Image (cartoon, coloured by chain):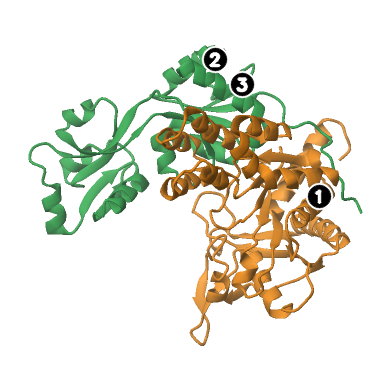
Chain colours: A orange, B green
Amino acid sequence: MTHPIPPGTRDILPDEMRELRMLQARLAEVFEGFGYGEVATPTVEYDDVLARAAAGTAAAYRFFDERGQLLAVRSDLTAPIARLVANRFASAEPPIRFFYNARAYRAVRPQRGQAGEFFQAGIELVGSPAPEGTVEILEVLSAALDAAGLNRAVIGLGDAALYRQLLEELGVGDDDRARLLTLLAAHDHVGLDMQVAGLDLSSDQKELLTRVPMLRGGPEVLDEARELGGEAMTTALERLAGTYDAAVERGIGDRLNLDLGLLRDLGYYTGAIVEVYDPALGHIIGGGGRYDDLMGRFGRPLPAVGFALFLERLHIAQAEEDRIAEEEGISP
Amino acid sequence: MSGVARPTAPLPSGPLRVALPRGALLEETLDILDRVGADTSAVRGESRSLIFDAGDFVFVTMRPSDVPTYVEAGAADVGITGKDVLLEQSDRVFYEILDLGYGECRMVLAGPDGEDRLAEQERRLGALRIATKYPRIAERYFEETGRAAEVIEVKGSVELAPISGLADAIVDLVATGRTLRDNGLVIRQEIVSSTARLIANRVAHKLRAREIDDLVKRLREATA
């Protein structure tokens, strides 16, 4: 007789657990080396407190406690840490540096092989504005990927406001702007092209709006974009280009993939957006960015930036990189 | 502190893996791939294989509705399938990068021939019973048009549903409309039109950008 467990959950057995713990320890060492202190927050919090973040993924599991209060299981660690900073570090001198190795929970669709319960390892840097703060977390992220043995991993770097700004520069109205940004966030470039075709713009401007979101790669994409878009593009690009230059100075430029069309959650990120890719895995292994508005919603208005790595995916990519290295006769 | 890092090995190499839809879209898909210089002869052959090595590409053939599954997971870098399939699986994450223009068809609401009694049925019975192979598109359509519908998912010939009394009407894909006519059904409303699309895996779209952009450029020229 077997006893079921809920969809999206699983047991972790000793061999895997040992490797996950090793990975966590390596990441923790990197985070601590950069001056980040580990925190743990409750798995369940009051729903209305987490909802203050009005960001990220909505809680998948909610229930009532013995007093009838609505509780929510956290879907990431960013909202709980924003709460923690506002509560416990209300007058601490910024910047504040925290890291976590914790489980988070999201809703899954049945039969999709999705995990509803998973480990995240990440950092939050509170009180350090762009570009310094952004570059710091990129440097930590790059070191963390090395520590995990993912030397081929690439960090995608975009800016949540870039396309919006470009649309503003071109005088595109509110409604059209919202429609275009929704399509871009959904990665629907065909829909985006069709929508752009119907706008009251010159053909050069339309070409700019359809080509910019497809620009991704090394620093050459910045030149390409400027060439395409002139003044309007230069303005929209300013912050991303600044962040990139600062990252190059720290020696992590080679690891970055500039991505002018990168957009994830609408309304969550306020500046830089980050995604982490490894050639051994078809899913992103981590993500993050700037959320300069978030802390203010908890009463401590400070700029903030961070990233989270999906530990199990990191582990899969690591195993795959080991296998490839073995095949090629290089010791891992 | 080991803060500085550089990729030490090259990014993914080897041929681009392309998911191809078996069935109605396959012929035109292979024709267009021929025009961009791909070797599709193996796929056209008599082989029962599902995966074909074709020089610059590896072709993986599958049901059209499986294409988003393989592409989302990275089991294929890019894939070709109908917009109808993408709409039905809109919660999956992938980049939709090119409208290939062929494979044109329409998603329609169709009911029994003769007087249109759907509105009356909805009013008297509270909700229409709609049979479909596309439950999510159907649900979204009725939600967006503010109508009540009970959506019944079927896997096979959906035209059977109104004839046999399982449903009042159907939501289905129509190319020529002949199957509808043969079964005494007529189109009541057009929901959305569909053509073949090229989609890309989220990671491949970044790490194999040059190859994918090159393929897009060639496909665009071939379909222009």
A10 lies left or right of B96: right
Q: Chain of mark 3?
A: B
Assess disc 3: are there few (<14), some (14-19) or many (≥20) residues with their C-alpha within 10 Å of its C-alpha.
some
**Looking at the picture, do discs 1 and 2 lie on one chain?**
no
SS class, disc 3: strand
Identity, as a three-letter code, of the amino acid under mark 2? Val
| Residue at 11 percent of width and 58 percent of height | B124
Residue B17 pos. (x, y %): 61, 27
Q: Is residue B16 left or right of residue B50?
A: right
The amino acid type found where label 1 is placed reads Ala
Depth order, front residue of A48/A129: A129
Q: Which mark is residue B36?
A: 2
Residue type at the position of mark 3 = Phe
Q: Quadrant of residue A91?
A: bottom right
Q: Label 3 belongs to which residue?
A: B57
Viewer-nearest of labels 1 and 2? 2
CA separation, marks 3 and 1? 31 Å
Chain ID, mark 2:
B
Q: Position of residue A133 (x, y in %)?
A: 76, 57
Residue assigned mark 1: A148
Which of the pair A163/B116 is nearer the observer? A163
> Residue at image x 53%, y 36%?
A209
